Amino acid sequence: MNNVGGDNIDVDNVSSHNVDNVGGDNVDFDNVGGDNVGGHNVDDNVGGDNFDGEIVDDVKDEKNVEKMNHGFKRSNDVVPYVGKIFDILDDAEAFYRNYGRKEGFEIIIRNTHKRTNTNEPSYRLLICRKGGRVGATLLDFGKGKRVKEVIPRMNCGARMCVVHKVKMDKWQISSVDLEHNHKLVSPEKVQFFQRSLNIDPMTRSLIELFNKSRIETSKVMKFLSETKGGVENLGFSNQEGRNVICDIRRRVFDSGDAECGLLLIRELQENSFGNFFYRVDVDDENRVRGLVWVDPWSMNAYKNFGDVVTFDSTYRTNRYCMPFIPITGINHHYQNILFGFALVRDETEASYKWVLRTWLEAVDNKTPRTIITDQDIVLGNAIAEVIPMPQTKHTYCTWHISSKFPEKLSYLYTNYPEFKTEFNAHEYKSLTPTEFEGRWEQLVEKYC
């Protein structure tokens, strides 16, 4: 090497015969394969955080991409390394985020540079969530408001920089620091990280496909987590998966189905000489988010047999997966009868409140003596606020409770064949609270 000007030059495994006139500071060549490497052929001059967003030069063709990846590639491709190539910026971010979850830290975007002529990103710096200056966290609990706690910064230096190669139209890792100055999170606690708010298009399409096949959201999430090797590797929470289903529900009335349904209901109202009751709830974009209707026969049935009402929100429409709520009861022949119907876009407390208030309006605000539901906490809160509890008792459906027995009591069912008979007798044949408590104590003493 002749006439090399500069400081701190680190050259490893350089296959070259004539390296001349390399000028500059902090030039780092690792595993570079080729001849006649001159100062004008240095690809990038990215040093730490002070990146000016300009690309000095790009790799000339796709063959050099393969050479670069091969030269820089380590034995474990899940660990970030300088020179790794990504097709798009989202892939780079997802790669570093997944690496962070495996190691036990979360990442954030520190800054992004854009080209002035196209306004397209040219550089992005991703850092550990605990990176940045150390500062005191101020929590104000005044005025009865709860302020969310923030994760304190510890000036962690772990980071990954990616730059856009114009000629290749790809993204490349320009620098990376894997060292942390804090303790990493254990793998079993990674699932509690704040999840990314974006679900990749392929996963979103898969969720929508399962939804069209009427597969429950919980089973879809279980399948996706198993394919990724666990919930911690999924990249988004169970709630965000359900939000995809909510998006489908929000689009349901964009088509002509809602209009056709409302035309049918209006026709039924005209044919019943105005006795057919219905109400429609719309959002700010004039899209239907709730519908309640009660026909004259149901109104009359409720006046005669409305002491006990079942409010079942576990049904789903087959096409849009929207909660369908039949309001039912039992007549003097122990036959199921209908007191009304509701269709809502989501299962929020506000939606349930609207349904309950609207249905009570249809039945002249006559409250039932007992209302039976499943063990939905949101629905229970809505009932407690809308329907006065001294006049109405809220109980849980025994069918929904007993459906969990095989899972919760599997040990007793397997090892004590007589337990199921005794348990069912205790559950269904106790006529008074005293008798119920007495049989329960006997079961506990015998099997526990």
Image (cartoon, helix red, strand yellow):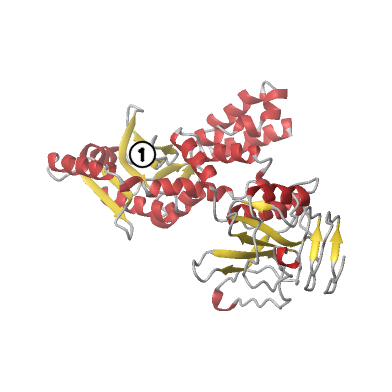
Q: Is residue 301 left or right of residue 67?
A: left
Q: Which of 95 and 313 is in front in this view?
A: 95
Q: Nearer the viewer, residue 123 or 269?
A: 123
Q: Which of 18 and 42 is in front in this view?
A: 18
Q: Where is residue 186 in the image (x, y as percent from the top left)?
A: 77, 53
Q: Toward which corner of the image does residue 161 lie, by quadrant?
A: bottom right
Q: Where is residue 333 in the image (x, y as percent from the top left)?
A: 33, 27
Which residue is found at the position 27% from the left and 37% from the top? 301
Q: Where is residue 132 in the image (x, y as percent from the top left)?
A: 71, 73
Which residue is found at the position 74% from the left and 70% from the top? 47
Q: In which quarter of the image is the N terminus?
A: bottom right
Q: Quadrant of the C terminus?
A: top right
| Circle 1 SS class | strand
Task: Report whether residue 121 is seen.
Answer: yes
Is the residue 174 above or below the residue 62 in the image? below
Task: Report whether residue 387 is seen.
Answer: no
Which residue is found at the position 49% from the left and 34% from the top? 215
Badge 1 is on which residue? 326
Q: Where is residue 386 in the image (x, y as percent from the top left)?
A: 39, 56
Q: In this view, does 391 lie to the left or right of 432?
A: left
Is the residue 326 above or below the residue 159 in the image? above
Q: Is residue 153 left or right of residue 420?
A: right
Is the residue 115 above or below the residue 307 in the image? below
The amino acid type found where label 1 is placed reads: Pro
Q: Nearer the viewer, residue 370 or 351?
A: 351
